[in-house]
Structures are given as structure tokens and as C-alpha cells.
Image (tube, rainbow, N blue to C red):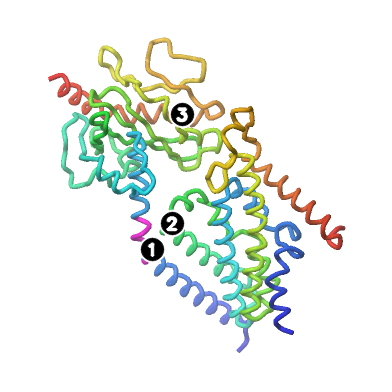
Amino acid sequence: MNKQSNSYTIIYASLLVIIVGVVLSVVYQALRPAQLDNIANDTKRQILAAARLVPEEGETVADLYADHITDSFIVNTDGQRVDKGVDAFDVNVSAEAKKPAGERLLPVFECTTDQGVKYIILVYGAGLWGPIWGYVAFDDNGDTIYGAYFAHQGETPGLGAEIEKPAFQNQFEGKDIFSADGAFQSVLVVKKGQEPGDGRAYVNAISGGTITSQGVQKMLASSLEPYTGFFKTLKESKQS
Amino acid sequence: MNISKDLGALINPLSKDNPVIVQVLGICSALAVTAKLEPALVMTISVTAVLAFSNVIISLLRNTIPTSIRIIVQLVVVAALVVIVDQVLKAWNYEVSKALSVFIGLIITNCIIMGRLEAFAMTNRPWPSFLDGIGNGLGYGIILVIVAFFRELLGSGTLFGMQVIPQWWYDHGYQNNGMMILPPMALITVACIIWVHRSKNKDLQE
């Protein structure tokens, strides 16, 4: 057989590609369940990190999650619980972010800690190079941030990527997202040394990571705002 | 006679014919994954696995591959193996696979792999090709681990994530060298290794 002929080359290439394709799909199918488990565990770890919970040695994330996350549900912009047949854990935020504000599914995770009940909310936005996201835990007054966790896909190491470091995240603890008269004001991320004149809550931005820092500010404003209704109901139930 | 030749395929790449410090291949990933020891070690194992198996597969196919699409066939085999390694890592060690992220995919473009396929596997039988793959993978890995050792020790004061620089050093004004974390220091560390290696092996000096 002439190994240099066109037909041999084409048949050879086609066979190779088909065999490789079959092998890869088998591997993918076989490993998929374990991968999905890992991704779910990683998400749980991030949710817990927002409520300042880190698994101790010998403790699995799944156990810690089961112990502390006592409820998870979906609310609408009025703050009412809705049942859309989707688990809060499975809500695809990047798809939700594209919907008009009124139709979004807003997941909430109720976390019972030593410091009382906290409500963890998912935030999603854009950094410099790609998506950034995070989880923010609120006290049951629906106003004060208890803890925050941010992650990113590909921000610049040492600059924008610093948003995933505790040094940045810990700044959010104790910040109020509503002003004294009850208007939504979010948390600003401003250049170190500066402060907004109007007394709004703020944290220091990362020097050299300006666009990512602004991304965090925008992400908080746009992701927390739809929850205003939910926070109001929390506040009212706390007062009554 | 064959035994010594096989052994040579395994041992030469560790020092005299090292892919990184003698042939100066695969430098890019040596910069990228050597800030910490653990990813460096995982990268070593991944590259060695891909290299050994792609060498064997190409060696088995070597008499059937049409020369006109030789490189494409090599790339398809390498790419398939890399995807498998990536999937396995995602299933078994998610944390490390997140840390290595895109670099696993970039094993495909690691010059060492294509280089060994062209230079060795296309003209040798499967067993020596397998040894050659293991040898070159380990030769690459030795350098990665040495570089990562110094970068993690001096840059973060840890080894495999464990604190090794005692706290009282820090109390007395010792500081981690933040420069070691940055990619350029990997190049300089590799250069230092080449310097030491060349001065020990006079015959390699030009």
C-alpha cells in the first residue's frame, strides 16, 4: 500500500480522529460525576468562606455545609420566597444577570453560626479580564455585612487577583449597605487614602488593580440592589 | 548491548542531555508553575505521563504515519493525552487543577514533547521510547522542583505549603523575598542551575 497517497492520508487522519474522539468521550463520561462533586464542593467552600467558616483538619466541606447551611431558597425582587422548581444552589448567576431585574431568581443561603443566623447572597460581575464573583454574608438585620468572599477567573496575579485575599475581603466586615434613612447605597471601593464625602460605607481598593476594584464596586451595587426587597422584609421581621 | 542503550535513554536526559538546562526547551512552563512546589510536582507528573505515553503511541504508529501529516498526527495524540490528564486532575485533585488551570492545556505546546516525538519516538521501538519519555519527563521535573524549592522557600518561607522559616526570624526583621514569586526570578534561578551544571560538566561548555 502506498502510504504517501492522498486516500491513505485522508483515511488515516479520519480514523485517528474518530478513535481519539471516542476515547475522549468515554473518559469524559466516566469522570464527570467525580468532577461535578468537586465543583459542588468548591462552591460550598466559597459559600461557607463568606460566613467566615473554614473546614478544620479532618472535616469535609460537605459536613460543614450540612451543619451550618440550614436553609436555602429563592426570592424575587419584592423579597417574597418563590418556588420555581430550581434549587438555590443550582441557580446559574451568569444567566440570571442577563435577565431584567424583575425576573431574576435570587438565591439566598441561610447559615446558622455561633454569631446568629446569617444570610449569604451571591454576587456576580466583571473584572478586567473575565468574570468575578463572590458570596456576601449579612447579619439578620438585613443591612450589615458579616463576611465576604470573592473569587475571579483570570485577574492579574498580585494586582486584581488580590480580591481573593483575606486582606481585601476582611475589610467588608461590619459595613452597612443601607444609609441611616434606609436608602440602598451599597459599599464603595475607593482608592486608599480617599473617602467618599457623603458618609457611605467604603473599603480600600487594591493599588494597581483599579479596574478589578471598580468591578467589585459595580458587582456589589448591581447584585445587591435586587435584594433590597428581601433585606427590607428581614429588617421588618427583626423589628416586629 | 541494548540494555545500555535503553538505560541511556532513561538516564541521559537527567543531566548530560537535560531538556531544560541543556536543550533549553520547555522554559515557559518552568516559569509559570514553579512559584510553589506542589504545582511543580503535579506538572512534572503530568508532563512525564503525557511524554511517556505519547512516545509509546507514536512509536507504535511510526511505520504507519503518512509523512505529510506527521506533525498533525503527533499533535492529535498529544492533545488527546493532555485532555485526559486534565480531566483526571479535575476529578481527583480539583484544588491543584485550579492552581495549574491553563498550564495543563499548554502541555500540548511544550516543546519537549514534540521534540522527543520527532527526535526519538519516530525512529525507535516502543520500549526505548517509553524510557526516553520517562527520562525526559523526570529531567524536566528535576529542574522544575529545584526551581520551585528555591522560589517557595525564599519567596513564601514555606515548602509544600508548610512553614519552614521559623517565626523568630521574621520577628528579627527577616522578610520573604517577594521578587522570587514573580516569573523573572524563575529564569534567573534556571540560569544559576545552568551555570553550576556547566561548571561541573566542562564538555558542555561552548
Q: Which residue is mark 1?
A: A31
Q: Pinpoint the chain carrying mark 1.
A: A
Give the residue pinned by disc 3: A168
Residue at mark 1 to residue at mark 3: CA–CA distance: 36 Å
Q: Mark 1 to mark 2: distance in Å?
A: 9 Å
Quarter of the rendering occupied by the C terminus of chain A: top left
Label 3 environment density (alpha carbons within 10 Å; few <14, some 14–19, many ≥20): some
Do the residues under discs 2 and 3 have CB atoms within 8 angstroms? no
Tag 2 and tag 3 share a subunit: no
Report the disc number at residue B90.
2
- Is A196 placed above or below A110 here? above
- The chain carrying label 2 is B
Q: Position of residue A151 (x, y in %)?
A: 43, 38
Placement of A172 over or under B22, stated as above or below = above
- Which mark is drawn over residue B133? none
Image coordinates of residue B99 in percent, x first then y, are 50, 48
Residue furthest to the bottom: A1
Drawn side of residue B154 relative to residue A119, left or right: right
The residues colored magenta run A30-36
Label 1: element kind:
helix
From this viewpoint, is residue A108 visible? no
Q: Residues within 10 Å of mark 1 (few under 14, many from 20)?
A: some
Evaluate if marks 1 and 3 touch, with contact meaning CB atoms under 8 Å apart: no
Residue at 70% x, 71% y is: B119
Q: Which is the main secondary structure of the residues drawn in magenta?
A: helix
Figure check: A76 above or below B48: above
Residue type marked 2: Lys
- Asked if the magenta segment contains residue A78, the reply would be no
